[in-house]
């Protein structure tokens, strides 16, 4: 990837966070808004290597959100955009199954069918060989739906290639500790990383896309107005029995589970509503989520996940556990009741030009782009400041 080998002191835009959202915003500014002096700052050694990698790799099509019509409907709109734009990273060659539990589900099979029809999502009753995998005493209905997975490694490769083509500057292994307003009205960022001369930069716009670290910036940044919740989560990677090799299965809608192809590893991810979250807390400025993750004693609950899945799908008991990936998951507090996944998109009046962005699903990026389309933002017209960006 390109790096700022000869960094300049002023940029049109600095994006903090090289996950999918940060990278997509950098590409949008370059391709759609004419910005040609952009710096992308990522604390890891590669883009898309944290939360953008450690997730179910699901491309949502609305089915997952029967208690939030808006989230489901937005997924229906965004999924075709995502699969078309990032087609090289999309896995479609598997059957996606949604099953509705008889007990403790917040929706019945009839309600789920009606919901799918209301959002215009394809659904059909699963054939007998698929239905036979489930215990009928515990599962009320089994359906085939249209839902895909993405390969996070291929997605990162595609993004890196495009960033290189657009000559967007990238500072890897680098963090931003503070954002302040300078005397000229621009934003001043203090950086810490291996790049000499990149200790302090100025920018017209700053996009805070640090996900769980959203409120860890010091200086004049006041934090987000929207309350956040963090969870230390465990995603188990398993090799399922052969009959499940080309299946993705989600049991709804309560304390249940999802089994999804994980193309980046050629395995399946297994997550469970009860066992995947290990502990949680309300966001606090002085409590760094990533430090919490690093200090946490990571003891897998995969055995409990597999055991519970096997109650509903008896033949899954032969699944082979490979490893677990632990990560921080951050959600909006207001999403706790209805399981919705709205974006966080905030501006701070005292720091004009600073945007804080967080999305609960990868396809939510198009909701962010819609917001940015309406913003009156433009690059600096002084071309002389561009000469140092490689």
Image (tube, rainbow, N blue to C red):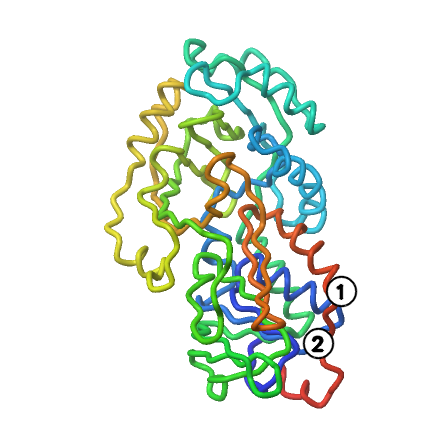
From the viewer's perspective, is 20 left or right of 299? Answer: right
Q: Given the current orientation, which residue lies at the most extreme front position?
A: 349
* Residue carrying label 2: 36
In this view, the residue in front, 287 or 48, is 287
Tell me if mark 1 has few (under 14), some (14-19) or many (20+) residues whose alpha carbon lies within 10 angstroms of its own.
few
Q: Residue at x 62, y 58 (%)?
A: 158
**Residue 224: image x %, image y %?**
50, 60
Could you tell me if residue 293 is visible in this image? yes
* Residue carrying label 1: 32
Q: Residue at x 51, y 34 (%)?
A: 338
Q: Quadrant of residue 183?
A: bottom right
From the viewer's perspective, is 196 left or right of 60? Answer: left
Answer yes or no: do the residues labelled 2 and 1 have beta carbons within 8 Å? Answer: no
Could you tell me if residue 174 is visible in this image? no
**Residue 341: image x %, image y %?**
55, 43
Q: Is residue 202 above or below residue 364?
A: below
**Residue 171: image x %, image y %?**
51, 75
The span from disc 2 to disc 1 (Cα, nearest Å) is: 11 Å
Number of the label disc, if any, that sits on residue 161:
none
Q: Quadrant of residue 342?
A: top right
Secondary structure under badge 2? loop
Q: Is residue 181 above or below residue 360?
A: below
Q: What is the quadrant of the C terminus in the image?
A: bottom right
Give the total of numbered labels.
2
Q: Quadrant of residue 36?
A: bottom right
Tell me if mark 2 has few (under 14), some (14-19) or many (20+) residues whose alpha carbon lies within 10 angstroms of its own.
many
Secondary structure under badge 1? helix
Q: Residue at x 61, y 38 (%)?
A: 71
**Residue 64: image x %, image y %?**
55, 32
Q: What is the quadrant of the N terminus in the image?
A: bottom right
């Amino acid at each position: 990837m390109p790096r700022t080998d000869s960094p300049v002191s002023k940029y049109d835009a600095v994006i903090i966070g090289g996950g999918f959202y940060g990278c997509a915003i950098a590409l949008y500014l370059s391709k759609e808004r004419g910005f040609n002096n952009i710096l992308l700052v990522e604390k890891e050694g590669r883009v898309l290597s944290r939360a953008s990698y450690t997730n179910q790799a699901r491309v949502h099509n609305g089915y997952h959100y029967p208690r939030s019509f808006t989230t489901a409907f937005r997924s229906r709109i965004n999924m075709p955009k995502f699969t078309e734009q990032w087609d090289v990273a999309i896995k479609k060659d598997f059957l996606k199954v949604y099953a509705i539990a008889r007990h403790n589900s917040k929706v019945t099979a009839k309600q789920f069918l009606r919901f799918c029809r209301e959002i215009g999502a394809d659904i059909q009753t699963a054939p007998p060989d698929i239905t036979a995998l489930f215990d009928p005493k515990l599962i009320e209905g089994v359906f085939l739906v249209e839902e895909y997975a993405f390969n996070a490694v291929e997605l990162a490769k595609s993004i890196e290639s495009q960033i290189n083509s657009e000559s967007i500057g990238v500072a890897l292994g680098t963090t931003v500790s503070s954002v302040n307003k300078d005397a000229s009205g621009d934003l001043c960022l203090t950086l810490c990383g291996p790049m000499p001369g990149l200790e302090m930069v100025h920018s017209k716009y700053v996009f805070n896309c640090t996900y769980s670290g959203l409120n860890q910036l010091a200086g004049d940044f006041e934090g987000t107005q929207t309350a956040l919740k963090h969870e230390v989560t465990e995603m188990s990677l398993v090799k399922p029995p052969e009959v499940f090799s080309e299946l993705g299965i989600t049991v709804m809608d309560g304390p249940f589970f999802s089994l999804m192809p994980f193309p980046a590893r050629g395995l399946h991810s297994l997550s469970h509503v009860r066992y995947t979250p290990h502990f949680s807390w309300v966001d606090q400025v002085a409590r760094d989520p990533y430090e919490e993750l690093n200090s946490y004693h990571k003891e897998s609950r995969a055995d409990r996940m597999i055991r519970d899945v096997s109650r509903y799908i008896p033949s899954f008991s032969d699944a082979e556990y490979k490893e677990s990936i632990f990560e921080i998951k951050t959600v909006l507090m207001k999403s706790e009741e209805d399981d919705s996944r709205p974006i966080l998109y905030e501006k701070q009046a005292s720091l004009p030009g600073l945007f804080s962005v967080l999305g609960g699903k990868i396809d939510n990026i198009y909701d962010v782009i819609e917001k940015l389309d309406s913003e009156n933002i433009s690059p600096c017209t002084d071309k002389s400041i561009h000469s140092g960006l490689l």
